[in-house]
Image (cartoon, rainbow, N blue to C red):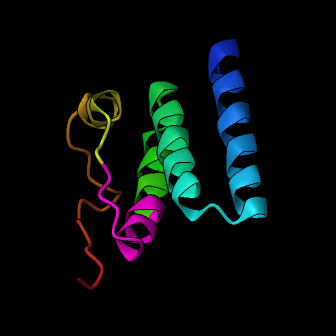
């Protein structure tokens, strides 16, 4: 269950993402993806946060940007320690 503050944060970041898409502001889209990731991580949805950061990374690289992983996001994503998917295996995609 999302907190009221978490719900407001997600709404605002989503709105900013929509505006960035409408206006074609690619750099802002990357920042809003990172913000959404931070909001999801703060609410404990680490899987969603990781997926959003995974989307932001290639988009940033394409524009020559370097994402600076916010300390709060990094902590929230790692605070619970390493977790393996069901079956215990870790799978990596192509590099």
Q: Position of residue 74 (x, y in %)?
A: 28, 36
Span colored in magenta:
55-67
Compared across the picture, whether 72 is left or right of 47 comes to: left
Q: Position of residue 31 (x, y in %)?
A: 50, 48
Please report the residue visible at 58 percent of the width from the left and 56 percent of the height from the top: 29
Please report the residue visible at 33 percent of the width from the left and 56 percent of the height from the top: 85
Please report the residue visible at 26 percent of the width from the left and 45 percent of the height from the top: 83
Q: Is residue 57 magenta?
A: yes
Q: In this orientation, does residue 32 appear?
A: yes
Residue closest to the eye, 77 or 26: 26
Compared across the picture, whether 12 is left or right of 95 comes to: right
In the figure, residue 78 lies in which quadrant? top left
Residue 70 to residue 43: above or below = below
Q: Position of residue 90 (x, y in %)?
A: 23, 66
Residue 23 to residue 69: above or below = below
Residue closest to the eye, 27 or 53: 27
Q: Residue furthest top?
A: 4
- Which SS type dominates the magenta stretch? helix
Image quarter hosting the C terminus: bottom left
Q: Position of residue 30 (x, y in %)?
A: 50, 56
Q: How many marks?
A: 0
Compared across the picture, whether 46 is left or right of 70 comes to: right
Residue closest to the eye, 64 or 11: 64
């Amino acid at each position: 269950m999302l907190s009221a503050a978490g719900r407001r944060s997600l709404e605002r970041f989503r709105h900013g993402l929509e505006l960035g898409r409408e206006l074609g502001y690619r750099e802002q889209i990357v920042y809003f993806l990172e913000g959404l990731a931070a909001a999801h991580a703060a609410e404990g949805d680490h899987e969603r946060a990781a997926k959003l950061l995974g989307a932001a990374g290639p988009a940033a690289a394409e524009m020559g940007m370097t994402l600076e992983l916010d300390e709060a996001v990094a902590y929230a994503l790692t605070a619970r320690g390493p977790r393996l998917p069901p079956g215990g295996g870790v799978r990596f995609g192509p590099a």
